[in-house]
Every structure is written in structure tokens, then in C-alpha cells.
Image (tube, helix red, strand yellow):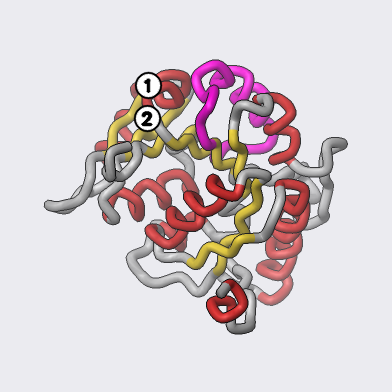
């Protein structure tokens, strides 16, 4: 990538989470493409994001075109559409990092953990996309509306992948979005991050919290060293 920031394509990018990530990554200098089933909808969402002077561009495309154009592809789609969207973009993401933020929420009991037969949405994505794609699970536990706010977010991001270099790339993206990325190990561990989302939804309801997140305690810098 010649030292330049990679092009980030966000599939399902017109939703709250996708838009929030786009705003923060664009402000950090990353060129962003919003993907949607409708190119017109994606273009309108991209134009609605206010890009300040000195920040990178935000464009809109249909999902397949966005997946082809992006160097790192981020999937932020509802679980009900997860498999369909992945099948649509599978050929376009061959050899790339695919960041999957999908959580297997099954209405109406979204505050109850309901994991798929594969163990997690991220493992299902890896199985569907194949070993040539570097699937990384991340961003399941951060509220989209908080990403859209200019205020800092007191929340960590668990980053899971079978590819260590891919994990490190996404940890850097978390930092660019103003979050702390935590290396949470292989993709099998994504089950914990995905399950936590349902738990956090329940906490939000019971305690009337505006988007509870997670924070890992301890001196992680010293431990990593």
C-alpha cells in the first residue's frame, strides 16, 4: 500500500455503526467507501457525512463495487442479512482482510445470547469466504450512535482473528477511530465478543444506560511487552 492509508469499504455502511466508523476513519485520514444494496442510498449517505478540510473522502457504491474497491472490507450488516451479503461479495474480497462486526441477534429476544451452529457469526463468515480471506471479528461492543458523536468513547474493542498481522491491522483501525483495540486471540474467541453484545443490550435496558461498553483492566502495555 506504499505507506498510504488503505481504502476502507464498509458494507452495510449506511447504518448507524457503519456511518459512525466512516465518520471517524475519514477524520483520521482514511479514504472510505460506504456500501449498500442501493448505490443511490450509499451515495446519499456518503454526501451526508460532513468531511472537514484535510480529512479523507467518503464515497458511496453498491456493496459488490465497494467490496472490490476496498483494500480492507468491513461488514456491518444485520445478522438476518449476513449470509446473503457475504455470498454477494465473496469473489470481491478474495485475499483481503474482512472485518466482521456482525452479531447474531435474533429478535425478539435480542438481550438473550443466541449463537449460530458455527459458534459465532465471524466463524460462519470465515467458513463461507474461505481460507484465502483474513476474517477479523471486531467492533461488536461499541454503540454506533456514540461513534457518530465527536466525544471520546470509554470502550475497548476485542479483536479476534487467526491471522496475527490482520489482528494488528484492525487494532490500528480501532485506534484511528478513537478506541483501544485489544488482541483477543484467534477467531474462535469471537464467540465471547458476540455474546457480550446481547448482555450489554440487557444491561442498557435494566440500568437505563446509553450504550454500555466494555473496558479491559490491567497494564496491557507492560503485559504485551
Q: Quadrant of residue 152?
A: bottom left
- Rendered location of residue 60, percent (x, y): 33, 29
- Rendered location of residue 29, percent (x, y): 26, 50
Mark on residue 42?
2
Residue 185 on the magenta segment? no
Asked whether 142 or 217 is in front, the reply is 217
Mark on residue 89?
none
- Rendered location of residue 126, percent (x, y): 69, 33
Helix, strand, or loop for circle 2? helix
Where does label 1 land, which residue? 39
Quadrant of the drawing holding the C terminus: bottom right
For image coordinates 28% across by 45% down, the residue present is 3
- Rendered location of residue 207, percent (x, y): 69, 76
Answer whether labels 1 and 2 touch (C-beta < 8 Å). Answer: yes
The residue stretch that appears in magenta: 75-97
Question: Is the residue 180 above or below the residue 15 in the image?
Answer: below
Q: Residues within 10 Å of mark 1 (few under 14, many from 20)?
A: some
Q: Residues within 10 Å of mark 2 (few under 14, many from 20)?
A: many
Asked whether 148 or 162 is in front, the reply is 162
In the picture, measured across the screen, residue 146 lies left or right of residue 197, that is left
Question: Is the residue 17 above or below the residue 128 in the image?
Answer: below
For image coordinates 59% across by 36% down, the residue present is 134
Residue 91 on the magenta segment? yes
Helix, strand, or loop for circle 1? helix
Amino acid at each position: 500500500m506504499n505507506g498510504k492509508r488503505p481504502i476502507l469499504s464498509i458494507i452495510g455502511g449506511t447504518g448507524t455503526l457503519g456511518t459512525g466508523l466512516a465518520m471517524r476513519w475519514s477524520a483520521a485520514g482514511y479514504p472510505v467507501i460506504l456500501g449498500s444494496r442501493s448505490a443511490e442510498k450509499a451515495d446519499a449517505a456518503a454526501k451526508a457525512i460532513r468531511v472537514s478540510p484535510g480529512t479523507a473522502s467518503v464515497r458511496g457504491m453498491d456493496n459488490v463495487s465497494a467490496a472490490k474497491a476496498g483494500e480492507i472490507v468491513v461488514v456491518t450488516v444485520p445478522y438476518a442479512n449476513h449470509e446473503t451479503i457475504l455470498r454477494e461479495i465473496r469473489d470481491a474480497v478474495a485475499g483481503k482482510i474482512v472485518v466482521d462486526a456482525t452479531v447474531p441477534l435474533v429478535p425478539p429476544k435480542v438481550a438473550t445470547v443466541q449463537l449460530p451452529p458455527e459458534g459465532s457469526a465471524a466463524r460462519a463468515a470465515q467458513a463461507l469466504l474461505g481460507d484465502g480471506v483474513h476474517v477479523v471479528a471486531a467492533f461488536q461492543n461499541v454503540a454506533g450512535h456514540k461513534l457518530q458523536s465527536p466525544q471520546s468513547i470509554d470502550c475497548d474493542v476485542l479483536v479476534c482473528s487467526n491471522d496475527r498481522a490482520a489482528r494488528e491491522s484492525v487494532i490500528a483501525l480501532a485506534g484511528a477511530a478513537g478506541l483501544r483495540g485489544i488482541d483477543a486471540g484467534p477467531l474462535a474467541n469471537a464467540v465471547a465478543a458476540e455474546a457480550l453484545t446481547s448482555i450489554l443490550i440487557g444491561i442498557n435496558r435494566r440500568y437505563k444506560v446509553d450504550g454500555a461498553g466494555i473496558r479491559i483492566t490491567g497494564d496491557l502495555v507492560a503485559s504485551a511487552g
